[in-house]
Amino acid sequence: MTGPSIQLDSVSYSYGSNLVIRDVSLSYDGGQFVGVLGPNGAGKSTLLRLLDRLLIPQKGQIRLNGRPIQEYGLKELARTTALIPQEPEYFPFLVKEIVMMGRTPFVGRFRREQPRDWELVKEAMEQTQVDHLAERPIHQISGGERQRVMLARALVQNTSILLLDEPTNHLDIQHQVSIGRLLQQKGKENILAIAVLHDLHLASLYCDQVILMHEGSVFRQGSPDKVLTGSTLHEVYGVALNVMRHPVNGRPMVFP
């Protein structure tokens, strides 16, 4: 099986006169978990929208799995990338129905949901620990539970690329760890997961690579060990942070 890949070549994007992505070049191949870090307004969410073609670069080119992103039809793109936005829209349906919406690219006018589709829905809900909520209306569960439901919906799209904007937002520490481990495991299963994260410690523990953005540009990229240093974080965030080594795995631990 050919591994997933993303390449950005000198990509820029502006909202009016506000340049929010500045000549960004990135290249990731194969299954891995990549964290996108940086302060508010650094361009992290805009980067994800460009990768899902919700926005079109005003300069440069994006390739998914070796092909220019503009060559993809809508259904083919939905079978290639799955995006969880920062503030998704919730329709008044049951949790299991919301998750099944992730199978939309595979269910058309002449093909209704099959037993295999429901098997995938069940597996995804178990992986994200929302299977016990299957019969609950989406508007009657908590924000953290909704976040995990949307991750389940993305998983059942069965794409090679996952794009997640703050997937651990609203989650307690138990589920933050659970999602971190799940995305790390998906990387080992030949899925390229790219997630915007604010928790530097969580990114350090579970990401294979991190992208540190600042003012729309890539300030540093590489392994957490190379990027999450006290001097680099001080330059980007403007505050002194303490970086220590995890006593078990040796990864950086970031504290105020």
Image (cartoon, helix red, strand yellow):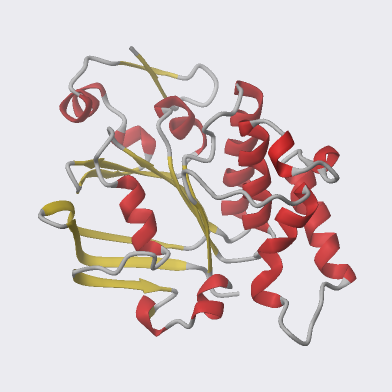
Rendered view: 179 above or below 240: below
User: Which of 191 and 238 lies nearest the eye of the viewer?
Assistant: 238
Q: Residue at x 72, y 34 (%)?
A: 141
- Residue that sits furthest to the front in the current view: 92
Q: Quadrant of the N terminus?
A: bottom right
Answer left or right for 160 relative to 113. left
Going by the image, does 88 lie left or right of 151? left
Q: Is residue 160 above or below residue 199?
A: below
Q: Residue at x 76, y 40 (%)?
A: 130
Question: Where does the image place residue 196, in percent across and percent down from the top left?
Answer: 41, 43
Q: Quadrant of residue 106?
A: bottom right
Q: Nearer the viewer, residue 94 or 184?
A: 94
Q: Residue shown at 73%/35% (left/top)?
A: 140
Residue 179 lies, with reference to residue 194, above or below; the image says above
Counting the numbered discs, the total is 0
Residue lying farthest bottom? Answer: 110
Is residue 97 found left or right of 165 in the rendered image? Answer: right
Query: Residue placed farthest to the right in the image?
Result: 115
Residue 124 in the image, given as x and y percentages of width and height = 74, 52
Q: Residue 81: x percent and y percent? A: 52, 66
Q: Nearer the viewer, residue 76 or 108?
A: 108
Tell me what residue is drawn at x 85 percent, y 38 percent.
132
Measuring from the top left, give residue 168's x and y in whole percent: 54, 34
Figure quadrant of the C terminus: top left
- Residue at the farthest left position: 17
